[in-house]
Amino acid sequence: MDLDGTTFALQIVNFLTLLWLLNRFVFRPIRAALQAKAEAEAAQRQALLKQAADLEAQRAQLAQQLAEGAAQRAKAQAALNDEIQALRKKQMQSLHEELQDERDKARARLQQEEKRLLESMEARQQQCASDYIAAYLSRLASPELEARIIALFLTDLDDHASAAAQALANPWQDDPQAPAPVEVSTCFQVDAVTRAQIEDRLHRLCTQPCLVSWRQNPALLAGICVHVPGFQLEASLRAGVRAAPSSTARAPS
C-alpha cells in the first residue's frame, strides 16, 4: 500500500477527529467527574475540618465545664466540711454543756444527800447528847434544886429590863381589863409560900389582870415554866437539855 500525502492528511484528520471526539465525549466527562469528585472531597474535607473544629471547641467547652464543675464540687465540699465541722462543734458544745449540767445536778444531789446524811447524823448525835444530858440531869433533879431554880427565876423577874419582865408587861389581848389565863408548871410540888411569891411577882409585873393556874410537869426535870398568851417563860433543866450543843460536823461547802 502506497502512503501518499492525501491519505496521510486524512489519517491526521481522522486522528484529530478521534482526539476531539474522545476529548468531547470521554475525557471531558471524566475530567468533570474527577473535578466534581475533587471538589466534593475538598468540601467533605472542609466539613470534616469544621466538624473537627466544632468537636474541639465542644471538647474545650466540656473540659471547661468539667473544670468549673470540679471547682464547684470542691467549693461545695469545702462548704459542707465547714458546715459539718461547725455542726459537730455545736453538738460537742451542747453535749459538753449537757454533761456539765448533769455533773452539776449529780454534784448537787450528792451534796444534798451528804447534807441530809450529816443532818440526820447530827440530829441523832444531838438526840443522843440530849438523851444523855437528860438522863444525867434527871439524876440531879430534886425539889431542892427546883427551889434554887425558882429562886433564880424570881430574881430574873425582879430585873424589869429582862426579856421576861418586858413580855409580861406587854398587853396580851385587846381588852386590857379582861383577865388573861396564866399557867405555871413545875416538876415537883411547890409549897404555898413559894406559890404566893410567884403569883405576887406575876401580878405585879403584868399590866392587866391574870388568872394563875398550877400543874405538875415531870418533863421539866426540875424548874418552872410560865405560859402566858403568846409567850412562854421557862427556867428548867429541860431548857438546858434543849440548849445542848450540836455536833461539830458540817456539810461541805
Image (cartoon, helix red, strand yellow):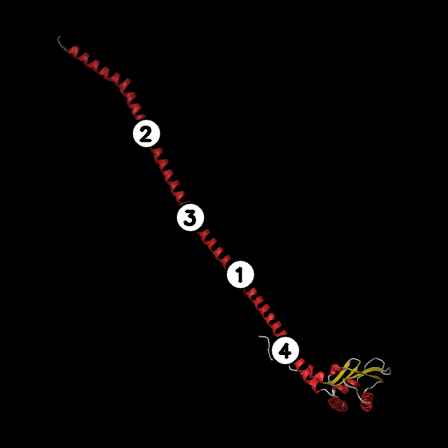
Q: Which of marks 4 and 2 is nearer the N terminus?
A: 2
The amino acid marked with disc number 1 is Leu
Q: Is label 2 or label 3 in front?
A: 3
Q: How far apart are marks 1 and 2 (CA)?
A: 77 Å
Q: Can you say which quadrant of the picture contains the N terminus?
A: top left
Above or below — where is 21 with respect to 221?
A: above
Q: Is label 4 or label 2 in front?
A: 4
Q: Distance between the residues labelled 4 and 2?
A: 120 Å
Q: Check contact, mark 4 vs mark 2: CB within 8 A.
A: no
Q: Callout 2: 10 Å neighbours few (<14), some, many (20+)? A: few
Describe residue 6's horizontal placement relative to residue 70 as left or right.
left
Residue tagged by mark 1? 95
In the rendered image, the residue lying farthest to the right is: 177
Q: Callout 1: 10 Å neighbours few (<14), some, many (20+)? A: few
Residue tagged by mark 2? 41
Q: Which of marks 2 and 3 is nearer the N terminus?
A: 2
Q: Earlier in the sequence, mark 1 or mark 2?
A: 2
Residue tagged by mark 4? 125
Q: Residue at x 29, y 25 (%)?
A: 34
The amino acid marked with disc number 3 is Ala
The amino acid marked with disc number 4 is Gln
Describe residue 252's horizontal placement relative to residue 237 as left or right.
left
